Image (tube, rainbow, N blue to C red):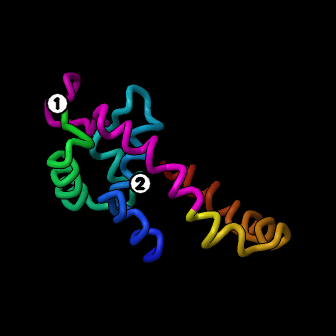
């Protein structure tokens, strides 16, 4: 993870920034409630709020009020954030492949997938 983080620094991003950009880019209307984004990225709400503030300053995301729930807030991917994830994703995926995936055989990858499958299924139930 440290290596991937260093590679993302070339784009002025951290691994946390990238994870947030990915979650927002894959969400309907490129937006998520802050509480859901905190859960998806396994961050406290306070930590996520600080992270989003830093990303807002870079123009990658913005906050919007939730009209259905006055206490709720959305994190929304900006056009600049969308362009950033599109530009950075191919390099990040290549790094993940180079440092992790390509270091394992097909049998090793299948073993890892089989080992994590019950964990993933349990976590899906808890959402």
Left or right: 79 with respect to 47?
A: right
Kindly report the distance in space between the C-alpha atoms of the residues bearing marks 1 and 2.
22 Å
Q: 76 left or right of 8?
A: left
Q: Give how far across and how far down residue 103 sits, in percent.
A: 71, 75
Front position in the image: 69 or 3: 3
Q: Categorize mark 1 by other alpha carbons within 10 Å: few (<14), some (14-19), many (20+).
A: few
Most foreground residue, 9 or 107: 9
Q: Which residue is mark 1?
A: 65
Q: Are marks 1 and 2 in contact (CB under 8 Å)?
A: no
- Which x, y percent locates residue 114? 77, 65
Query: In the rendered image of this protein, does residue 126 appear above or below residue 32?
Result: below
Instruction: Residue 120 in the image: state x and y as whole percent.
Output: 62, 58
**Residue 33 belongs to the span the image colors magenta:** no
Tell me the residue that label 2 is attached to.
Answer: 19
Q: Nearer the viewer, mark 1 or mark 2?
A: 2
Q: Is residue 123 left or right of residue 117?
A: left
Q: Residue at x 42, y 44 (%)?
A: 85
The magenta stretch spans which residues?
Answer: 66-94
Corner quadrant of residue 45 = bottom left
Write down the quadrant of residue 116 in the picture.
Answer: bottom right
Label 2, residues with CA under 10 Å away: few <14, some 14-19, many ≥20:
some
């Amino acid at each position: 993870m440290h290596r991937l983080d260093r590679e993302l620094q070339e784009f002025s991003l951290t691994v946390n920034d990238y994870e947030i950009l990915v979650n927002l880019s894959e969400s309907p209307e490129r937006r998520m409630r802050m509480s859901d984004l905190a859960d998806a990225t396994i961050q406290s709400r306070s930590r996520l709020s600080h992270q989003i503030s830093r990303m807002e300053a870079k123009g990658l995301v913005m906050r919007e009020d939730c009209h259905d729930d006055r206490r709720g807030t959305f994190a929304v991917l900006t056009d600049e954030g969308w362009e950033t994830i599109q530009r950075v994703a191919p390099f990040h995926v290549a790094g993940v492949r180079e440092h992790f995936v390509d270091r394992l055989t097909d049998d090793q990858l299948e073993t890892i997938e089989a080992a994590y499958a019950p964990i993933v299924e349990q976590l899906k139930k808890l959402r």
